[in-house]
Image (cartoon, grey):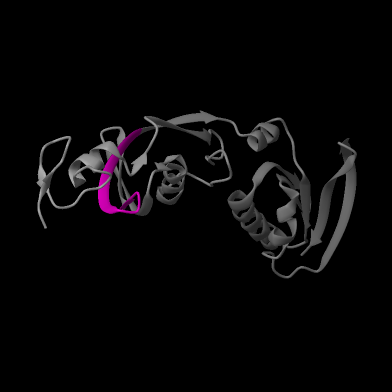
């Protein structure tokens, strides 16, 4: 096959992509693009990222970067490299379905801290549920408090803990984790549930849940 010349750089080649040599085609067509700056909003109290992505770690950062990349081809793999305040992203893929290529993108991760909506409510005394632990055994009460605090801190937020003569009342949010929390308690003798109407929002009654647990 007779060689031809790239009309842009003059390089002799047998393979053309949109009438350009491979190098000029890659230069003209990028595999992916990323903003110069990516802002991440994190709660200053609970440390969670806005958008229900959990706390900032390698996995969540990768998800955020993926969501901000605009692909002009098919990306097969991605690798994040942090360097002097900048974040470099190495992407591998197929450019316009024609050429295997690797590119390095660069962005700056900017973290903004502020209270999330839930923590803001909790700071103001907001709560959705109450667990009332009662027992004549002081050791059981202490163990129950330790268990509940650990479990709730992983899945929700504690507003306050009130000490009682034979136990404690623990105020927290959200109420949807209530049943999961109770399952972590051992030697439960009795469970009583009650509901208090708090408000009506958009025609829907909102209730606060209270659970009395005897150990």
Please check the rendered image and state whether residue 25 is part of the magenta-colored stretch, yes or no. Answer: no
Q: Residue at x 87, y 39 (%)?
A: 198
Q: Could you tell whether 28 is left or right of 37 in the image? A: left
In-front residue for pair 42/138: 42
State the predominant SS element of the stretch in magenta: strand
In-front residue for pair 100/140: 100
Please check the rendered image and state whether residue 95 is part of the magenta-colored stretch, yes or no. Answer: yes
Residue 188 drawn above or below residue 93: below
Q: Where, by quadrant of the figure, is residue 38 drawn?
A: top left
Q: Position of residue 66 (x, y in %)?
A: 43, 46
Q: Which quadrant does the C terminus fall into?
A: bottom right
Q: Where, by quadrant of the figure, is residue 139 drawn?
A: bottom right
Residue 146 drawn above or below residue 28: below
Q: Could you tell whether 153 is left or right of 105 in the image? A: right
Q: Could you tell whether 29 is left or right of 133 in the image? A: left
Q: Where, by quadrant of the figure, is residue 214 drawn?
A: bottom right
Q: Which residues are magenta?
A: 94-107
Q: Which quadrant does the N terminus fall into?
A: bottom left
In-front residue for pair 71/150: 71
In-front residue for pair 111/125: 111
Q: Residue at x 40, y 49 (%)?
A: 58
Count of residue discs: 0
Q: Position of residue 169 (x, y in %)?
A: 76, 48
Q: Could you tell whether 170 is left or right of 68 in the image? A: right
Q: Position of residue 174 (x, y in %)?
A: 71, 47
Residue 49 drawn above or below residue 113: below
Q: Residue furthest front?
A: 2
Q: Position of residue 156 (x, y in %)?
A: 64, 48
Q: Residue at x 12, y 49 (%)?
A: 13
């Amino acid at each position: 096959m007779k060689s031809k010349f790239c009309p842009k750089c003059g390089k002799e080649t047998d393979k053309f992509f949109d009438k350009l040599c491979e190098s000029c085609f890659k230069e003209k067509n990028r595999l992916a693009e990323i903003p110069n700056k990516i802002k991440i909003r994190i709660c200053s109290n609970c440390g969670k990222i806005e958008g229900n992505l959990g706390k900032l770690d390698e996995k969540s950062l990768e998800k955020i970067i993926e969501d901000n990349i605009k692909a002009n081809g098919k990306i097969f793999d991605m690798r994040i490299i942090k360097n002097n305040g900048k974040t470099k992203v190495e992407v591998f893929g197929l450019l316009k379905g024609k050429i295997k290529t690797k590119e390095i993108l660069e962005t700056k991760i900017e973290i903004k801290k502020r209270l999330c909506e839930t923590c803001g409510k909790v700071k103001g005394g907001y709560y959705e549920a109450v667990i009332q632990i009662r027992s004549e055994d002081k050791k059981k009460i202490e163990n129950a408090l330790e268990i509940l605090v650990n479990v709730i801190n992983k899945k929700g937020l504690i507003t306050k803990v009130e000490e009682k003569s034979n136990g404690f009342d623990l105020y927290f949010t959200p109420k949807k984790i209530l049943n999961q929390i109770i399952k972590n308690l051992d030697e439960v003798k009795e469970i009583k549930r009650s509901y208090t109407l708090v408000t009506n929002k958009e025609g829907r009654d909102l209730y606060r849940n209270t659970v009395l647990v005897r150990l």
